[in-house]
Image (cartoon, rainbow, N blue to C red):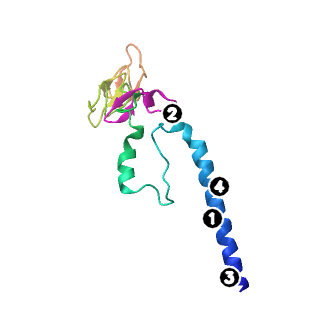
Amino acid sequence: MNFLKLSFMLAMVLALAAITLSTEYTSQTSHFLPADHQMPTSFRGPGRFLAQNSRHAFTCDRHPKVCSMRGSQGPFCCNKKCVDVKTDKFNCGGCGKKCNYSKICCEGKCVSPLSNQKHCGRCNNNCGKGKPCVYGMCRYA
C-alpha cells in the first residue's frame, strides 16, 4: 500500500513539473513566434496536419524580415533560406549560382583560392604586386 501511495505522489510531482516547464517555455518563446502561431497542446508535439501548416512560419519567403534579424545566416532570401550572396558557395552573387568544386565565393564572385592574386588561400588575402599566388600561398618556394 505504501508503494502505491509513493508511486502516485511521484507521478503527481512529475506532472506538476511538466506543466510548470511547459508554461515557462511558452512564456519565454512567445515573443519570437508570429501572432497566428500556436504552441502544440500535446507532449508529443503537433500532429501531422498542424506540423504541415506551421512549417512555413519562419521561412524568409513569407517573412522577409527574418533575414535581417541578429544571428541570421545572411540578408538575402534564396530558396526559403537566409544567405549572404557575397560569401555563400551555393548562391554566389545571386540565388542558385554555384561555385565549382575548387572555387570559393569572395565578394559575390567565384574565385580559385589556389591561384587568385587578390584572394590567395582565402578571401581578401592580396599577395601584392610582383608576388604570385601559388597553391594558395603568397611567395611560394
Q: Marks 3 and 2: CB-CB under 8 Å?
A: no
Provide the residue designation for mark 3: 4
Q: Are marks 1 and 2 in contact (CB under 8 Å)?
A: no
Q: Which residues are magenta?
A: 65-84
- Measured as percent of width and height from the top left, residue 5 is found at 71, 79
Q: Nearer the viewer, mark 1 or mark 2?
A: 1
Q: Is residue 119 visible?
A: yes
**Between discs 4 and 2, the one toward the N terminus:** 4
Label 2: element kind: loop
Label placed on residue 71: 2
Q: Are marks 3 and 1 in contact (CB under 8 Å)?
A: no
Q: Earlier in the sequence, mark 1 or mark 4?
A: 1
| Count of number-bearing discs | 4
Q: Position of residue 71 (x, y in %)?
A: 51, 33
Image side of residue 123 versus residue 32, left or right: left
Q: Circle 1 is placed at which residue position?
A: 15
Circle 4 packing at 10 Å, graded few (<14), some (14-19), many (20+), is few
**Alpha carbon of mark 3 to alpha carbon of mark 1: how far?**
17 Å
Q: Earlier in the sequence, mark 1 or mark 2?
A: 1
First in sequence: mark 3 or mark 1?
3
Nearer to the camera, 115 or 23: 23
Looking at the picture, which amino acid does disc 2 mark? Gly
The amino acid on which the numbered mark 4 sits, given as a three-letter code, is Thr
Q: Is residue 46 left or right of residue 100?
A: right
Q: Which mark is residue 36?
A: none
Which residue type carries mark 1?
Answer: Ala
What secondary structure is found at the residue carrying circle 3?
A: helix
- In primary-sequence order, the first of circles 4 and 3 is 3
Residue 132 in picture, x, y percent from top left: 35, 21
Who's the residue at 36% across and 24% down the image?
A: 133
Q: Which residue is mark 4?
A: 20
Foreground label between 3 and 2: 3
